[in-house]
Structures are given as structure tokens and as C-alpha cells.
Amino acid sequence: MKICFIMYPWERITAETDTTLRLIHECAVRGHTLAITTANNLTIRENTSLAFCNVFKPNIRILKNAEMFHRYAEFKKSLLPLAGFDAIFLRTNPPVDTLALNFLDSIKDDVFIMNDLDGIRIANNKLYTNSFSDADRKFLPETHVSKNKEYLERIFNESSSDRMILKPLNGFGGRGVILIEKSARHNFRSLLDFYIGDDSQSNYVILQEYADGASEGDVRILMLNGEPIGAMKRVPDPHDIRSNVHAGGHVVKHTITREERLLCQHIGPKLVRDGLYFVGIDVINGKLIEVNVLSPGGIVRINRLNRCQLQKRVIDFIENIVSCRENTLNRKHTLRKIIEDEAV
């Protein structure tokens, strides 16, 4: 199999914890032809989409250890046609690069892309969670999104809860997430002024109910083809409400609960319909807080906590998809040949 990873620069990888590295390493162990590139290296020549790639040189001596593989990997630089790959794995950091998706539109029918381009377009924002039907409010926290400061103030004041979460719509990695308490409501308008800005350049903000149990952390669940394959609990620093590891949180082993499985069953079919085959969801007390579709992480930490290798299941899935597509194409060619022979 020939696979290309469109990702962040190789030299910026934190080898000890990087999920993308484990996926690439697993492909290398299996002997697949591997190339990596960044969104900035996409190009078009004579109406053909290409990329300036680093192609891995095979080196069996260093394949057993992902960190050593990262340190000693050797590359050959090549300009390659993207339609020539069997699969493309998008692993770029947020926010989504819409121009990069436009480059890939011309080859999306020729190559299996993880995740689907249109799926990324509709899901790479915090509003995507509201597309899951939840009339009984079992799976989604009560959420308000607006630029209207008076409206948000009214929602906050009328809330039956003493606490709510305020965060920017375009934030990621826990950045800008703050806890608002009724006892400090005199600061609320000032915070809205800061987050939303003025009329010339305003931003949307999210005002969300405070989920019970949030102070104890959240759960990151990795989902593959609509099914949960692993999870971990992220516990915040005692002086921070954010559970993100990059914000000072730490992880502990977690067994997926009945409520979390019901949530996964509820959202899984839509994720698959939208072509979002590999995602990370953030859950608090059985409620969906966020869906991560660009470069969901956690494989290394979940592996260590559970003595598993989730990357094997992800690459198995890609191999199966590519094999099915090839079998379908070969069968089509065979049947077309029969018709051509009979027509002579």
C-alpha cells in the first residue's frame, strides 16, 4: 500500500507521545511505501495535484521502536502525484486549512482519504455537536453560541446553575476555556468584551452549562468507523478547570461506562455517514463536549495505560478499505472485458 500523511513538520513531533508517529511507524513495520508532507507543500502542475514529499527510505534495523524510528528515519525528497497514493491520512493541527482541502478535492474520488474532506468541512468546529439529534438532552450539554452580548448576559443571569463555561468558538486545546460563577457576574460583561471584541472584528463565543463531574476531568474516547476503540480520563491540575494534557492535566486509566457506550452508539452512525472514520470525542458525565476530527491524539497514552496497540486497528481499517476498493475496481475491469469480448 502507498500512503501519504499530510501533517505537521516531522521535526516538530514529540516522539514520546505523538499519535501520528505511531500510525506512520505501524505502516513502516508492515512494509508500506510511505511519504509525508505538509499542507504548504501541496501544488498543482498541468492540472494535476501533487505534493513535495519526503519519502521514507526503508531501514529494517530501526523499525521496532517508534522513537528510534523517528530519530533515524531517512528520506528522499520527491514531487509526487497525490492520485497515485492508495490512501491519504490528514493529520494537521487545528484550525482546518480550507485551501489544503481544496487542493485535495480533485483526487478525493481516486484515493481513500481519512477523514472525508466534506466531513472535515462540516465537523471541524464546535457547532458540529449540535447536529446530533438529542431532544431529551441525554447526550449534549445545554449550549448557547452568539456574538450578542446582551443575549449572553441574559442567558447567564437566567440560568438555574451557579456556574457556566465560557469559551471561544474557534479555540482548541483548551485555550480560552474559563469557568464563570454567578458570584462574579460583575466581571461577565468585561469578559464578553474581551472574547467577542468590537463590531469591526467580532468573534463568536460559546456559553455552556457546567457539566456535573467536570472538576474531576473529562474522558477522551477514540472512535474508529463509528465504534469506540479506547479511552482515557484526563484529570485537570488542581488549579485549573481544563483537563487537556497540554494545559497541565494528566491521564489515568478509564473503562468506558454504559452511558458513554450509549453516547457512542448514538453518534457513531452519523460520524460514519459524514466520512469521519477516526475521531476523538471529549465526554463529561456521559455528555458530548467536543468532536476532534483533524488530528485526534491519545493513542500512545491509551496504549500505555491498557497495554494495547490501537494504531494496529487503525491501519487494519485503512488496509481493508483500500483492499475493498481495489477488489471492486478489478471486478469492474473483468466484467467490462467480458462485455468487450462479446461485442467483437
Image (cartoon, rainbow, N blue to C red):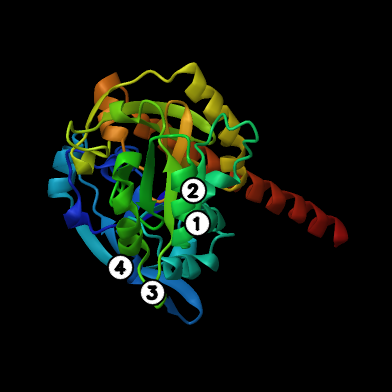
Nearest to the eye among marks 2 and 4: give it: 2
Gap in angstroms between the C-alphas marked 1 and 3 = 19 Å
Gap in angstroms between the C-alphas marked 3 and 2 = 23 Å
In terms of image quadrants, where is residue 105? bottom right
Q: Amino acid at mark 2?
A: Ile
Q: Secondary structure at mark 4?
A: strand
- Quadrant location of the C terminus in the rendered image: bottom right
Q: Amino acid at mark 3?
A: Gln
> In this rendering, would 225 be left or right of 182?
right
Residue on which disc 4 sits: 78
Near-viewer residue (332 or 3): 3
Near-viewer residue (70 or 245): 245
Relative vertical location of residue 79 with respect to residue 312 in this rendering, above or below? below
Gap in angstroms between the C-alphas marked 2 and 4 = 55 Å
Residue 309 % position (x, y):
32, 27
Visible in this render: residue 339?
Answer: yes
**Residue in view at x 47 percent, y 35 percent:** 160
Say if mark 4 contacts mark 1, CB within 8 Å. Answer: no
Residue on which disc 2 sits: 155
Q: Earlier in the sequence, mark 1 or mark 3?
A: 1
Residue 215 % position (x, y):
30, 29
Relative vertical location of residue 225 with respect to residue 129 in this rendering, above or below? above
> In this rendering, would 213 be left or right of 21?
right
